[in-house]
Image: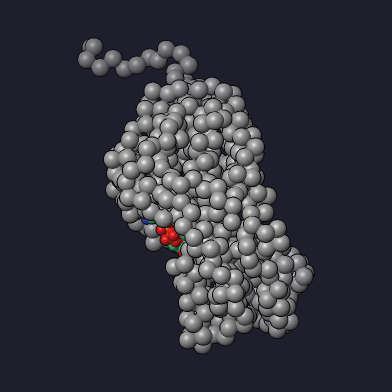
């Protein structure tokens, strides 16, 4: 394995790396289990220094008040700098996550760069509002940056997800403190250095590393933080939102899912099969928007599921750095054990293991598993209700459109949903009646950054995307000005 990881990862505050100190935590390569680096955990005092740096950069500028075209210049330079370092960033991300290197280069790093271009362009077209219906006044609404954002990122797609939060926060003139997952600090540490190499002023983006309960909680509780954006598990989201709520700090919560992937008999079955496999097995199965509950119309179910299982068994599992690998290792040993545990849960609940459910011991000490599919006994089964967050598909069958929609909605989650059908009335009913933040029709995942992304129910609160981010990262300010001197009542002058 090429060893390019830094020996130690520390915080990055006010434009400079912090000297190593604090609790050392191991950073491992999921493909071998080998310890490849060490993270120095930021305690509350270090978080305080990071927030103070962000506060200073916000309160004293120049970033929030910079002319938009100047801010755009920096964002576009960041985009180019990220693209210039695609190999380095992808390798660091691969070492840390076990995601397939090729996909990291083609999708994740490319997306990270695009996020900066997108928000650079977005702010170039922003405008306020003017209300002139009352001729005595002109009322103008402008938008101002909110302040210091606390950005908390997960481990499943660190660069792609965190870069979106950073790009959105700073494009609208905020400053921020980013806290990556303690499992995956490597690529984001380099990314934050690159932001500065691209010309971002000191203090605009600060980085703290460490565990959620220590570093993350200190960030959320810090009185200098004005808003919190979180992507991660639902239980953690509840806790963070409660903490932020006590301080009346706005939050966005992008949480888990158990998304229905509905295959109607009116679908193009080959397309649906390709889409279903991508929906559950891409990103090593570790994605909030996975189509993890596959609902198949009974008339086509046997054939569809047989073909799905046959293809699943041919998926190339292995070295995430190899060009032909399709599924790498899971992110950590405890996570692998948790995912595999669901195979036993499925059978103990009366489900049937169709394929997988075991570790790939033949691939060494890495956290490799066989991609897995189970036939669930019913939608109440834990494998249909709980987010497994791995390459683990749960199948159910249905007879009618009504039944499919009812099954899709019988979940505490409501992040996304996939619908495969070439019958327009079926598509129209499904898209209007499914209770999820996003419905994809005849396509696997499609993140349109211009449109809102986020979930109903336990899948989240708030949205991310162009206008949704503008609304979150700016405060509207209403200014009313008389169009001519007013004849004011003269209290006390009679
Ligand atoms: O995530 P956590 P975990 C789901 C998935 C997974 C489960 C648990 O089902 O199995 O969540 O994963 C930080 N204050 N998703 O436990 O804890 C933490 O350090 C502030 C869905 O690994 O949610 C990390 O940076 N921060 C998902 C981030 O929160 C805290 C992506 C996410 O970690 C904190 C990941 C606290 N009190 C997991 N506690 C998605 N929506 O894509 C933790 N953190």
Q: Position of residue 197 (x, y in %)?
A: 54, 30
Q: How is the image coloured?
A: one colour
Residue 25 image position (x, y, % from top left): 38, 53
Q: Quadrant of the N terminus?
A: bottom right
- Rendering quarter of residue 76: top right
The image quadrant that residue 488 belongs to is top left
The foreground one among 322 and 227 is 322
In the image, what residue occupies the spot 72% across and 67% down?
Answer: 274
Q: Residue at x 62, y 40 (%)?
A: 85
Do we see residue 318 in this rendering? Answer: yes
Q: Is residue 97 left or right of residue 327?
A: left
User: In the picture, residue 366 is in which quadrant?
Assistant: bottom right
Tell me where residue 42 appears, x and y as whole percent. 34, 45
Q: Position of 480 compared to 111: left or right?
A: left
Residue 253 appears in the picture as rendered: no
Vertical comparison of 459 with 53: above or below: below
Query: Residue at the location (45% across, 54% down)?
Result: 27
Specify the quadrant that holds the C terminus: top left
Q: Which quadrant does ligand 1 occupy?
A: bottom left
Q: How many numbered marks appear? A: 0
Q: Nearer the viewer, residue 389 or 3?
A: 3
Q: Position of residue 391 (x, y in %)?
A: 58, 69
Q: Nearer the viewer, residue 37 or 114?
A: 37
The residue drawn where x is 52% and y is 50% is: 158
- Note whether 269 is above or below 323 in the view shown: below
């Amino acid at each position: 394995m090429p060893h390019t990881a830094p020996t130690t990862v520390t915080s990055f505050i006010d434009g400079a790396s912090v000297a190593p100190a604090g609790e050392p935590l191991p950073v491992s390569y999921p493909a071998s289990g080998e310890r490849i680096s060490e993270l120095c955990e930021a305690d509350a005092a270090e978080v305080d220094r990071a927030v103070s740096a962000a506060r200073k950069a916000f309160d004293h500028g120049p970033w929030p008040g910079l002319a938009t075209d100047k801010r755009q210049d920096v964002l576009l330079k960041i985009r180019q700098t990220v693209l210039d370092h695609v190999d380095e960033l992808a390798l660091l991300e691969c070492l840390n996550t076990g995601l397939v290197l090729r996909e990291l280069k083609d999708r994740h790093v490319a997306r990270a760069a695009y996020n900066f271009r997108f928000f650079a362009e977005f702010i170039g077209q922003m405008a306020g509002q003017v209300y002139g219906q009352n001729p005595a006044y002109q009322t103008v609404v402008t938008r101002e940056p909110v302040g210091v954002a606390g950005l908390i990122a997960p481990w499943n797609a660190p660069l792609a997800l965190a870069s979106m939060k950073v790009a959105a926060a700073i494009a609208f003139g905020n400053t921020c403190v980013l806290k990556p997952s303690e499992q995956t600090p490597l690529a984001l540490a380099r990314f934050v250095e690159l932001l500065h190499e691209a010309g971002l002023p000191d203090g605009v983006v600060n980085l703290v590393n460490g565990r959620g309960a220590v570093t993350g909680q200190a960030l959320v509780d810090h009185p200098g933080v004005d808003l919190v954006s979180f992507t991660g598990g639902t239980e953690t989201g509840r806790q963070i939102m409660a903490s932020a709520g006590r301080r009346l700090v706005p939050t966005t919560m992008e949480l888990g899912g158990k998304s229905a992937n509905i295959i109607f008999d009116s679908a193009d079955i080959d397309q649906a099969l390709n889409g279903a496999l991508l929906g559950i097995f891409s990103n090593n199965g570790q994605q909030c928007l996975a189509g993890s509950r596959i609902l198949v119309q009974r008339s086509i179910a046997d054939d569809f599921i047989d073909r799905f299982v046959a293809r699943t068994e041919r998926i190339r599992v292995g070295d995430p750095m190899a060009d032909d690998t399709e599924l790498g290792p899971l992110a950590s040993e405890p996570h692998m054990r948790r995912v595999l545990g669901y195979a036993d849960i499925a059978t103990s609940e009366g489900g049937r293991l169709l394929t997988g459910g075991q570790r790939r011991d033949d691939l060494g000490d890495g956290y490799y598993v066989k991609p897995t599919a189970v036939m669930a006994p019913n939608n109440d089964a834990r494998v249909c209700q709980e987010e497994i967050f791995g390459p683990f598909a749960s199948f159910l069958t249905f007879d009618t459109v009504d039944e499919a929609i009812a099954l899709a909605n019988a979940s505490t989650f409501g992040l996304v949903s996939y619908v495969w059908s070439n019958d327009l009335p079926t598509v129209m009913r499904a898209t209007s009646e499914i209770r999820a933040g996003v419905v994809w029709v005849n396509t696997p995942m499609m993140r349109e950054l211009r449109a809102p992304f986020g979930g109903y129910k336990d899948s989240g609160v708030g949205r991310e995307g162009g206008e949704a981010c503008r609304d979150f990262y700016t405060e509207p300010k209403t200014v009313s000005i008389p169009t001519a001197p007013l004849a004011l009542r003269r209290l006390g002058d009679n």
